[in-house]
Image (cartoon, rainbow, N blue to C red):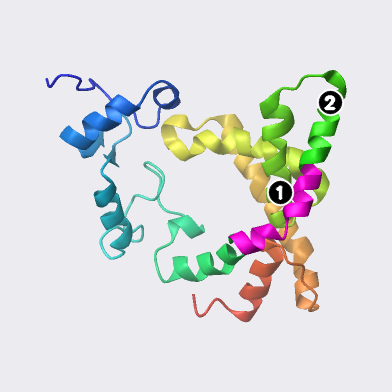
Amino acid sequence: MDPGEPRSIDLLDGDFYVSNPYPTYAWLRQHDPVHHDTANDLLGISRYDDIVTIERDKATFISSGTERGYRPNIPADRSIIGLDDPHHTVRRNLVSRRFTPRAAGRWEDHVRGVVTGLIDAVLPAGEAEVISQLAAPLPAQMIGLLLGFDDEMWPKLQDWSERTIALGGGPRYHDHDGVAAAIEFAGAAAELYEAKKPTVTEGCPMDDVMTVWIDRERTGLDGY
């Protein structure tokens, strides 16, 4: 065994990342740049140039026609990240233009107002639990707004996000609560879709991701 060689590496173990993973990264780059993680049956690529090559090779590294998707041991789904080109690019371009620096800049005043409100809410106590009272509510509120959910939905969006995040690690990390949260979110998204659809068909959609998506679906996704 080489000096410093890790005895086992679970690339989906959260404790690995909150400890000190950098010596392991260095060892992988030098000795095992295409590492087979036997705990999760996946490959970990640690060299930058290799990652760029894989990212650019859209013929070899694909999801369609395989039993693997972008999550360990789970087939690819129909979400943007799970689709290959040209389907992926058509959908990404539709959504990504709303997250450019210029587009995001239009929300600066709104974000500032949300942050001010969160800080004002904790000031009387003289202290705050930074994650639950500041860091988590801000993205939940903004993501909910951009998706098209009503303001009062953000606590549920935050809850669903926290309960489902481990599911991306594959079947080893699936539990009843996480799956239930995923189903709850899917139901809420379906309800939002149905609620927004009439405004789109009547020709007055709002500029949120859901109504933009519905509008493009109505006019066609370039055959994809």
User: Which residue does the image show at 60% across and 42% down from the upper left?
Assistant: 182
**Residue 127 as seen in the image, left or right of residue 124:** left
Sequence-first tag of 2 and 1: 2
Residue type, mark 2 in image: Leu
Residues 95 and 101: in front is 101
Location of residue 76 in the rendering, given as x and y in whole percent from the top left corner? 42, 53
Element type at mark 2 = helix
Q: What is the residue that sits farthest to the right in this orientation?
A: 124
- Label 1 sits on residue: 142
Query: Where are the magenta residues, as a range?
Result: 101-114
- Give the spatial CA distance, label 2 vs label 1: 22 Å
- Name the spot of residue 33 as percent of width and height, x first: 21, 39
Residue contact between numbered discs 2 and 1, judged by CB atoms under 8 Å:
no
Q: Which mark is residue 123?
A: 2
Looking at the image, which residue is at 81% across and 48% down?
151
Rendered location of residue 1, percent (x, y): 11, 20
Q: Is residue 123 visible?
A: yes
Residue name at image x 82 percent, y 19 percent: 126
For residue 217: magenta? no
Q: Dot 2: few (<14), some (14–19), or many (≥20) neighbours within 10 Å?
A: few
Task: Give amino acid for label 1.
Answer: Met
Would you say 70 lies left or right of 51 here?
right
Q: Nearer the viewer, residue 183 or 157?
A: 157
Which residue occupies the foreground of this view, 74 or 150?
150
